[in-house]
Image (cartoon, rainbow, N blue to C red):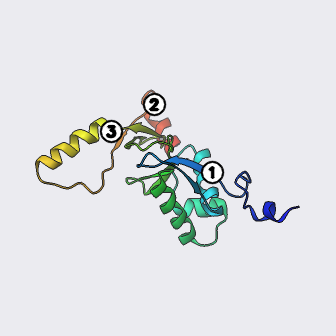
Amino acid sequence: MPASKSQGSKRNDLPKYWTISRQKHSAMEQETILNKTETQVLRYLKRATKPFGAYEIKNALGIRHPITVYRALERLARLGFVHRLESQNAFIACHVPNKTHYAGFIVCRDCGTVTEIDTEAALSKLQMQARDRNFEVEKSTIELIGRCNKCHDRPMARRSATRRQ
């Protein structure tokens, strides 16, 4: 086997490292190469049906040190590939990672399902109100917590059992 394949240096050698194109704010296309841990974490979150905390990810992937997962999550969030859910201290894969956007989340308090939503219009209005009050917004998070249609129609006893799973 050629040395370049075993080292994962070729851009099409995706099993070891992902090469991801992402639109930058300057509208220039730029490639981002993720390391092995970042790739594992991103793949795990893309397959997940719910958000996971760093320790859950660490244990599921068999990663020895939590700081390794925290660093991967921090970089993936900075690049826009994952989002942090403040209410759960957990992470979820971004559903539109190639586009700069303002994500918000609908979180079902019964089954834990999380759906990413576009909050650009709402955030724009909130930021305008903040500016009118001479307030500089540094960070904003929109999480709408309630019950999804599936849980809304279920009897209360079944909902509680589902949440504990």
- Position of residue 53 measured from the top left corner of the image (x, y, whole percent): 50, 58
Please tell me whether mark 1 sits on a helix, a strand or a loop.
Answer: helix
Given the image, on which type of amino acid does mark 3 rest?
A: Glu
Crowding at mark 1 (Cα within 10 Å: few <14, some 14-19, many 20+): few
Residues at badges 3 and 1 in contact (C-beta under 8 Å)? no
- Position of residue 2 measured from the top left corner of the image (x, y, whole percent): 86, 62
Crowding at mark 2 (Cα within 10 Å: few <14, some 14-19, many 20+): few
Q: CA distance from mark 2 to mark 3?
A: 35 Å
Q: Nearer the viewer, residue 80 or 112?
A: 80
Q: Residue at the spot x=30%, y=51% of the render?
A: 140
Quadrant that contains the N terminus: bottom right
Q: Residue at the spot x=45%, y=49% of the render?
A: 24
Crowding at mark 3 (Cα within 10 Å: few <14, some 14-19, many 20+): few
Given the image, on which type of amino acid does mark 2 rest?
A: Pro
Given the image, on which type of amino acid does mark 1 rest?
A: Arg
Q: Residue at the spot x=52%, y=62% of the render?
A: 54
Q: Sequence-wise, which precedes: disc 1 or disc 2? A: 1
Q: Which residue is mark 1?
A: 43
Q: CA distance from mark 1 to mark 2?
A: 35 Å
Q: Quadrant of residue 10?
A: bottom right
- Position of residue 65 measured from the top left corner of the image (x, y, whole percent): 59, 73
Q: Nearer the viewer, residue 25 or 138?
A: 25
**Residue furthest left in the image:** 133
Please tell me whether mark 2 sits on a helix, a strand or a loop.
Answer: loop
Q: Which label was assigned to residue 98?
A: none
Q: Which residue is mark 3?
A: 120
Question: Which is in the foreground here, disc 1 or disc 2?
Answer: 1
Q: Which label was assigned to residue 155?
A: 2
Position above or below: 103 against 61: above
Position above or below: 163 against 15: above
